[in-house]
Amino acid sequence: MDRHLPHSHSLRKGRHSLPGHWYLVTFATQERRPIFLNHLTARLACRSFYAESVRHQASTLSFVVMPDHVHWLLRLDGQLSDAVRIYKARISTGLGQKIWQPGFHDRALRHEEDLKPAARYLVANPIRAGLVEHTGDYPYWDAIWL
């Protein structure tokens, strides 16, 4: 899930985004620039998950903002491509510049019991990346269960 997929499409071929289903989505900054090392920029990315325009498209179950990419576990209410586009646009607009690579990588979660393990995997990304030793030491994540 943490791999950079340079040729990923907005929605994988043959995949349909289905309202009411759960998705794990990953998208990266242009040229993998670590713009979220900046505290204010990372906070903007975190707050944007709770913006009304984003909440109208998806319910956020968990997220982590890494230095050069974002992981988002969501329950879809609209179209997946719209949810990602609106989220990305909020941050780009807030920063006054385009910061994202086109597209995103998505994985549909088939069963509700997959959600908590996916959230745990997601918020442990900063540990696996060597940014912190403990999940609680990394400030740019949230999960409804943890």
Image (cartoon, rainbow, N blue to C red):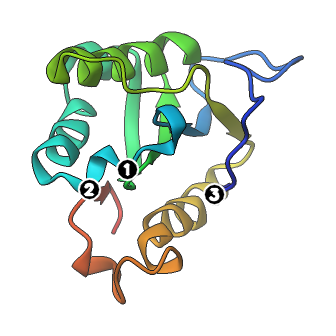
Residue 113 sits above or below residue 33 on the image? below
Estimate the x, y position of residue 135 in percent, counting from the top left.
34, 78
Mark 2 or mark 3: which is in front? 2
The residue at which mark 1 appears reads as 34
Residue annotated with mark 3: 2
Residue at 37%, 26% (x, y): give it: 99
Estimate the x, y position of residue 117 in percent, counting from the top left: 59, 67
Q: Quadrant of the C terminus?
A: bottom left
Question: In the picture shown, does residue 123 fall above or below 5?
Answer: below
Type of the residue with mark 2:
Leu
- Residue 85, given in percent of the width and then of the height, sits at 45, 14
Q: Is 129 in front, or is 22?
A: 129
| Mark 1, other Cα within 10 Å: few <14 / some 14–19 / many ≥20 | some
Q: Are marks 2 and 3 in contact (CB under 8 Å)?
A: no
Q: Amino acid at mark 1?
A: Pro
Nearest the eye: 39 or 81: 39
Helix, strand or loop status at disc 2? helix
Residue 133: image quadrant is bottom left
In 3D space, how far apart are the residues under numbered discs 2 and 1 (Cα atoms)? 6 Å
Residue at the right extreme, as displayed: 14
**As shown in the figure, which amino acid type bears the numbered disc 3?**
Asp
Image quadrant holding the N terminus, namely bottom right
In the picture, measured across the screen, residue 30 lies left or right of residue 86, that is: right
Q: Secondary structure at mark 3?
A: loop
User: Between marks 3 and 1, how big is the CA–CA gap?
Assistant: 15 Å
Q: Which residue does the numbered mark 2 point to in the structure image?
A: 37
Please give the name of the residue rendered at 51% of the width and 61% of the height, measured from the top-left corner.
122
Res 79 → quadrant: top right
Which mark's residue is nearer the viewer, 3 or 1? 1
CB within 8 Å, label 2 to label 1: yes
